[in-house]
Image (tube, rainbow, N blue to C red):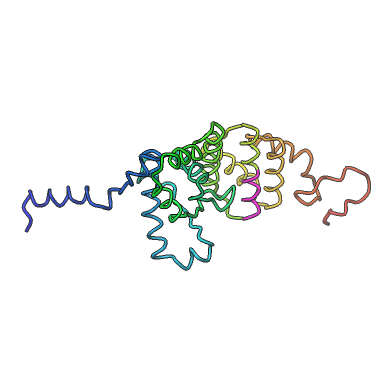
Amino acid sequence: MYNKSEVDNVMWLDIMSQYNTLQVNIKLANLLGLEVATYWAALMDVYARVVNKFKDELEKNSGYFELDRDYITKRTTLTLDKQLEIDTGLGKLGVLKHRGENELNWITLDVEKLCAILVDDSIDAIRDIQRVSKLRREDTSRAKKAAVRINLVAALKETDPDVLTAYNNWIDALLEAKKPITRQALDIYQNNLNNYTDNKQAKIKILEIATTNAYTEFAWSMKIYEKDYRGNGTFIGVRQNRAGGIDPNSSF
C-alpha cells in the first residue's frame, strides 16, 4: 500500500516525466532561437518513432511522413502558422522540405545537414546561417495564409474525391481573392449544399460557380445554378439548351 506522500510523489513524477518534457538543443536555440529549437526537438521525437516503427512506409514515401500539427502544438504551444513560419526558415537551410505546395503536413528532414550546420562554430558561418534563414514579410504572410487553408481543408466532411477537389479549388479561390471564410461558415455551406442536392455533378457545378466568382454564400451560387444549369428534362450540371428543337440531353 502507498501512503499519501508516496502517491503524491508518483503523481509529481508522472507530470515531470520525460514524456511531458522536451530536450532542446541549446546550440540550435542560440543559433536560430528558442522557438525553432523547441519545434525541432518535437520533430525529433516524432521522427524517431517514425523511423523505428514505420521505416518501410517512410522509404515508400521517399522519406516524407505526415506530421500531426495539433500534436506539435500541444507539445510546444506553437500555433500552426508559427510552425509553418519555422518550416520556411528551415527550408531555406535545406533541412526541411514539404512534399508539395498543398501538402504542408507532409515533411522530410535532413538531420545530418542540420548537425553539420551546428558543428561549424565560425563567426562567418553563424552569420551566414542566420542571414539565409531569416524570414521576410512575405514569408510570414504566406505561412498565415497556408495555416488558414490547412484548417479549412481539415473541416471538410466530403468523402467523394472529385467533390473534395472542387471544395479545395473553391477554398483556394477565396484565399486568392482575399475573401476569408470561417470554419463555421464552411460548415454552413457544406450543410446547405448537402441539403440542396445529393447529386455529385450538381455539387461540383455549384462549387465551380462559387470558385469562378469567389462566392462565400451558398445562396449566390445556387441562384446562378438554378438560372443557367437546372432545367426540366436536362442532366444536372449541363447548361440548359434554350434554342428550339429537342434537347439531346432530354429523357422521356
Image location (x, y in percent) of residue 193: 62, 44
Q: Nearer the viewer, residue 43 or 219?
A: 43
In magenta, the rendered stretch is 161-169
For residue 99, above or below residue 223: below
Quadrant of the frame with the C terminus: bottom right
Residue appearing at x 36%, y 49% in the figure:
41
Residue appearing at x 79%, y 40% in the figure:
228
Residue appearing at x 58%, y 54% in the figure:
159
Magenta-drawn stretch contains 121: no
Q: Is residue 71 visible?
A: no
Q: Nearer the viewer, residue 50 or 120?
A: 120
Q: Nearer the viewer, residue 101 or 70?
A: 101
172 horizontally vs 252: left or right: left
151 horizontally vs 34: left or right: right
Image location (x, y in percent) of residue 80: 46, 41
Counting every numbered tag in the picture gives: 0
Specify the farthest residue to the right: 245
143 horizontally vs 41: left or right: right
